[in-house]
Structure formats: structure tokens, C-alpha cells
Amino acid sequence: MRASPHVKFVLPAGFRGLFKLVTDPNAPPRDDAAAYEIPPSGVLAIRDTRPLERWHDTIAAFDDHTLLPVASAAPSEPLDEIAIDLHHVTADSEGNIWFLVGTEAELDRVLKERSRLNVGPVT
């Protein structure tokens, strides 16, 4: 049995809020297709989404090497308003893939407002 490939996200220390991966065939090539270093802007252009489309394990950390837990399920009542995790939010009609670094309560708000996603803090 083979181990699942890893997809790794590295975020700026203290990053909180929404970020997105933007599919762009003109994006610069990356050394590791399954490692995503998210810039402070919260927008990373990538050429290839295949590592995300295949079965994988997700790991995340801040660039100061602090681990970031990855949520593996949708939020459930009562919503956690304390624990900060990486959450997959959605893939939109423009090919952007959205993620949230935040609480379950923030994820719940984001999911209710999916048509108006913006990079940055969740209000």
C-alpha cells in the first residue's frame, strides 16, 4: 500500500483569513508542484491544479515553522470559535481555489457568503 502524496501549504506567520490559488498558465514554474507558499497578499498563481485534484493528505504550517492544523470535515454545531485551522472553502467558476485560515464559526460565515469571497480577514 502506497502512502498518500502530501500537499503542503506554507503561510506567512500569523496569516488569518481567506486566500486563493489562481490558475494561470503563465504562472512561473515551481520547484515542488505540491508545495504552495502563500504570499502575504493571499493570492498565489499556479499553473497546475492536478496535485490538489488527486487524493492527497494536506499539511500546513506558517513560515516560522509553527504547524497549522488542517480541518478534515465540515463544521458542526456547536461551532468552534477558538481553534484556528486550515479549511478548504470552494473552487469557484473562474477556477480559483479558496481556503480559510480561521475558526469553524468564520468558515460558517464564509460558506453563507460564498458568492462574495474576498482575500483577507473574515468579517
Image (tube, rainbow, N blue to C red):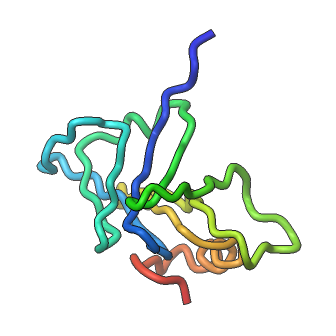
Residue 109 position by quadrant:
bottom right
| The C terminus - image quarter | bottom right
Tell me where residue 103 appears, x and y as whole percent: 66, 73
- Residue located at (76% from left, 64% from top): 75
Q: Residue furthest bottom?
A: 123
In this rendering, would 56 be left or right of 69?
left
Tell me where residue 31 appears, x and y as whole percent: 21, 36
In this rendering, would 62 be left or right of 1?
left
- Residue located at (29% from left, 40% from top): 48
Q: Residue furthest top?
A: 1
| The N terminus - image quarter | top right
Q: How many numbered dots are placed on residues in this image?
A: 0
Tell me where residue 26 appears, x and y as whole percent: 12, 49
Residue 74 position by quadrant:
bottom right
Work out whether 63 lies above or below 77: above
Tell me where residue 21 appears, x and y as whole percent: 35, 57
In this rendering, would 27 be left or right of 36?
left
**Residue 93 visible, this angle:** no
- Residue located at (62% from left, 63% from top): 85
**Residue 119 visible, this angle:** yes
- Residue located at (87% from left, 73% from top): 78
